[in-house]
Structure formats: structure tokens, C-alpha cells
Image: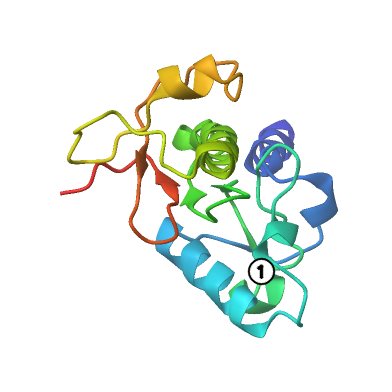
Amino acid sequence: MWKKWTKKKSNQQHIPNSYNNDNIIEVDLDTIKAAVRKFAENAPPGVTTKVLVKDDHSIDFNLLKPFLNGIPNKTFYMSKETYEVFEEKDKAIPLYIDKVQQAVDRYVDMYKKLPTIPDDPYQKVSYLMLENNSLLTERPPIDFYITNEEYLVTYKRPK
């Protein structure tokens, strides 16, 4: 009896209490991304995908239940600025993306140009430019680049 109770408890440790009565499902990153897209397509006017993101950047699956038919057995994270979705192992990335994206947006508002390293073909974000303008207080441990689409920040180096 003790083994059964221990096993059941260990299977539910990573599932928040608000989800315990829901159908727990196994999903991958692509499934979560598809559900987020479906949510965005079906959201009422004025409701943005940002409502899916909790303060710790984890995804609130209560809103995605209709698109997943349950609650994932793992936690996924999302950027509030770019809506990129991440697995547990990369949960720090959305926080850094949001900080850098906000700093880049403010820099562009101030100077009408991108804060990129001069002559860099990949449009790598210049942390120095952002720091010198008090727009970034902590330098992220990874590099970010600016895409040509809407000048969004990404951690993926362009090809």
C-alpha cells in the first residue's frame, strides 16, 4: 500500500493543484505551439495570447484545455513579447527574451534605429548599447538577434 501511495504522489508532484482533477495528457512542444496558435486564432477581439502567460512565464493551461483536451503532464513556458514556447530545460529564455525585447523596443523609440552590433550580418543585439542607455540592467547569458519580421528578438542565430 505504501508503494502505491508513493508512486501516485510522485506522478502528480509536477502538476499544480488547480489541475489535479483534470485529464492529464502527455504532449510535446509542437503540440503546445499548435494549441497556442489555435487559441490565438479563436480568441475574442482584444484578447491577446499574453493572457496565457503567468508571472513566472509558465503557461496557464486552463485556457488551453479546449485545444489540448486535457492538461499537459509537463510545464511549458512562453515569452510574453514574442510568444515563443519553451520546455522546462529552457525556462529562463522567455524571461531574457522579454527583457531584451522591451529594451530593444525602447531603444528604437529613442533613436529610430536597431541596437545591433555594427556590420553584424546576423543583427546580433548589442547589450552595450542597451546598457549605455540604461535600458538593460542585466546582461543575458546567451546571445539574441533581431529578426526582419517586426524586429522581434530571438535566441536563434539566423542562417
Is 118 on the left-hand or right-hand side of 54? left
Residue at the spot x=54%, y=36% of the render? 107
The location of residue 22, given as percent across then percent down, is 76, 64
Relative height, residue 127 to residue 106 (above, below)? above
Label 1: state its secondary structure: loop
Instruction: Name the foreground residue: 125 vs 95.
Output: 125
Residue count near mark 1 (Cα–Cα under 10 Å), binned few <14, some 14–19, many ≥20: some
Which residue is under mark 1? 70
Q: What residue type is disc 1 on? A: Gly
Work out whether residue 122 can be spotted. yes
Task: Answer with the quarter of the image where residue 106 lies.
Answer: top right
The location of residue 84, given as percent across then percent down, is 49, 53
**Quadrant into which the N terminus falls:** top right
Is 45 on the left-hand or right-hand side of 117? right
Q: How many marks?
A: 1
The location of residue 118, given as percent across then percent down, is 25, 30
